Image (cartoon, rainbow, N blue to C red):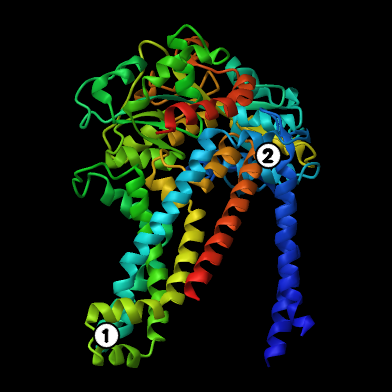
Amino acid sequence: MRPRLVVALIALLTVCLPISEARAQNALVVSIWGGNWKNTVESVIGKAFTAKTGIPVEYEVGGTIDRLAKARVAKGSPLVDLNFTTTHVARLYMSDGLYAKLDMAKIPNAKEIAREAIRSDYHLGTWAYVYTVVYRPDLVKEQITKWSDLWKPSLKGKIALPDFDPSHIITIAALMEGGNEINWQKGEARLKQLKDSVAAFYSTDAQSQDLMKTGQAPVQVMLSVNAYHLQEQGISVKVVQPTDYPGIVGIDTVAVMAGTKKADAAHQFINVALSKEVQAELVKALRAGPVNLGTAVPAGLKGQPGIFLTAAEWKERGYIMNDEARGKTLPAWREWFTANIVKK
Amino acid sequence: MKLLLAPAVVVLAVFAAALAALFRWSLLEFIPGSLQTGGLTLANFRGVLAPQYLDAVWDTVVLSALTTALTLAGAYPVAYALARTPSRRVRSTLLVLTIAPFFTGAIVRTYAWVLVLGNTVLTWPVPMLFTERGVLVGLVHFSMPTMILILAAALSHIDPVYERAAASLGARPARVFWRVTLPLSMPGIVSGSLIVFAWTLSAFPTPEMLGGGKVKMIANVVRDLGLDSFNWPGAAAFAMLALALTLALLAGLGRLAGGRAA
């Protein structure tokens, strides 16, 4: 009886596997982070794309580096057709020839997006946010209005910074000393003065939000979308629009994988993602800024940190680091930051 | 007989291939801002000998040694009670309490410590969260169940007749423990300590969550180099260095403990 059962199971698997493979062959496969990112892209962009084209979409979910490593291993015959990642990590994909050059004629909606969202011939921004100062007014009695407030002695032991990517605070310190991300060393001395104020360093967005929720670090250099997410959960956090220097802009991008056999569908997907209607839905779901300049945004989000609606706002209310410099200098920044700020 | 060894050989070959790939990566030149690597170089090994990385190695060894000692001290009385209590109910209760942590994930347990060691539940006289002290508490808690079970197994193998004989010859309970029970339980102490020391050397979630980025152990540094700096050759070099150190330490400790136990 048992051998018969095994044979039946094997036969069932043999029959079923080609079906799932066939489904995968028809579908457009999108690589993206998990959680809210995947859910939003699936429900907003994926649905609109399938409704328009009839092509189903499947998602490969993973962390930034897991997905990069997989893409590298599958170079030439990619396992996915489209990839979402941050703009500076996209440079790593490009450095290894993992992205296909975009055919802009197939993405007419790209004509409506901010100049800053056209990151290269290979990748386009889909939404934006800022790293800015976020704090809990119930635990920090004084008002924080500028980046330089972080250096106030009263905030000693209350601040959390990201250690996985210290580029934001390094750039701000450099800007305060008349430099920028290229000659970042100008801000070294100022940044060292911040060392004693740091309660913790966080490696993930989840850790950052936990530190804020528990009050262990009620002042943070934090992603604006995460701060809005905390507000939605009923946690009173204030997202600062710094008056001295702008927030550091982050742009998440999408690109077509080199070697994909579904390049046309992939371009269509990007075009759908950049349309005004889909952008408006993305803003509502992610609380991130649109890249299409004609996007309608809920009144409550207009003018908020990370929400740029005009070419002028993109220019004036956010600081965009040079992708290439950021990608090349990040290891040196992390090394310096660990040795001088993180180390006891 | 040889055929029976075949699966183990295959598994070993896969691990050896992975290690060889890691070693190869450690010798490739890192090009910042690129996934491409350059030619062969020893620069990655020179790079990871910088003070900040060596500090992480030192912190890891010290934390592992302290964790082993504190876990042993904390686990021994519990293991003794578990092995020697005549009450079935007490034994069952102790056993359930000991193995209960295995049924909650490491992340959940560590997250609970984030709440306890912070100032949300208790107010501590000295800072605990995001310090070595806090990480040590988490590591000891994580290691306790395993140490208790190993020690309890060793203690239950000691025939109580030896202790009774010592007592009948006039030895007080403390002397019986120091001269009879403790030496006879040495195999359990040695194996438990080696296991706890070895896995604490590779601890990751506890220092990651309780250290608040300020306490870095070897695994955290490997992750930082590989996943945050995109420096895969550097991460591979540090991992190789850490592996060599771990093997050397364990070999040394094993030899030392073997001598003592004998």
Horizontal side of residue B225 vs B192, given as left or right: right
Residue at point 71%, 73% (across, down): B8
- Judging from the image, what secondary structure is the residue with disc 2 in? helix
Q: Residues within 10 Å of mark 1 (few under 14, many from 20)?
A: few
Residue A19 point in image, percent of width and height: 73, 63
Report the Cα–Cα distance between label 1 and label 2. 54 Å
Q: Amino acid at mark 2?
A: Pro
Q: In the image as oriented, which residue stretches furthest toward the front?
A: B169
Vertical position of residue B18 compared to residue A213: above or below = below
**Displayed quadrant of residue A305:** top left
Whether residue B248 is visible, yes or no, is: yes
- Judging from the image, what secondary structure is the residue with disc 1 in? loop
Q: Which residue is mark 1?
A: B85
Q: Which residue is mark 2?
A: B233
Q: Amino acid at mark 1?
A: Thr
Residue B33 point in image, percent of width and height: 66, 27
